[in-house]
Image (spheres, rainbow, N blue to C red):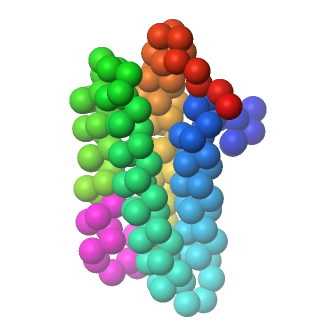
């Protein structure tokens, strides 16, 4: 199973956003090793925070519309990540911070999709909600 398959839920809009977030994380990873990295990392982090905020709002809207029973817990996970990302965005990022930030966010995203997102995708599928394009 490749990386794209691991973050694919069968929800086209959500899947596309997951791929964009993964690409943004890859940009941060590349920026960490480049000269002038601080500007690039900060720009990529700004983009990542903005995209994550939009993505979480979309997921939470989908859960609300379809009355997903674990919506509040899932939204709490989103808020915790966004709080962490905002703290990073509001301070200067060192090389060591960049690496630990990237590892944390990659792990969080992978685990969140593997657990919480898969549960709500299964809930939608079991409720008969069309989940593929």
By secondary structure, the bulk of the magenta-drawn segment is best described as helix
Q: Residue 15, percent across and down?
A: 59, 40
Q: Quadrant of the C terminus?
A: top right
In the rendered view, tell whether residue 128 sits above or below residue 4: above
Judge by depth and name the residue closer to the eye, 99 or 44.
Answer: 44
Q: Residue 3, percent across and down?
A: 69, 42
Give left or right: position of 127 versus 130: left
Judge by depth and name the residue closer to the eye, 36 or 63.
Answer: 63
What residue is at 32 percent from the left and 68 percent from the top?
88
Q: Residue 131, percent across and down?
A: 59, 25
Quarter of the rendering containing residue 52: bottom left
Give left or right: position of 100 versus 36: left
Does residue 36 belong to the magenta stretch? no
Judge by depth and name the residue closer to the eye, 2 or 104.
Answer: 2
In the rendered view, tell whether residue 28 sits above or below residue 10: below
Q: Residue 121, percent across and down?
A: 51, 23
In the rendered view, tell whether residue 123 sits above or below residue 65: above
Residues rendered magenta in the picture: 85-97
Give left or right: position of 54 versus 69: right
């Amino acid at each position: 199973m490749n990386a794209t398959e691991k973050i694919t839920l069968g929800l086209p809009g959500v899947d596309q956003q997951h791929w964009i977030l993964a690409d943004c994380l890859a940009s941060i990873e590349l920026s960490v090793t480049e000269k002038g990295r601080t500007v690039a990392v900060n720009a990529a982090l700004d983009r990542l925070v903005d995209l994550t905020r939009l993505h979480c709002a979309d997921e939470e809207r989908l859960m609300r519309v379809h009355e997903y029973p674990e919506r509040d817990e899932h939204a709490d996970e989103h808020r915790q990540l966004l709080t962490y990302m905002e703290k990073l965005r509001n301070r200067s990022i060192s090389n060591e911070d960049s690496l630990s930030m990237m590892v944390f966010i990659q792990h969080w995203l992978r685990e969140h999709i593997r657990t919480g997102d898969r549960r709500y995708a299964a809930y939608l599928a079991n409720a008969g909600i069309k989940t593929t394009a």
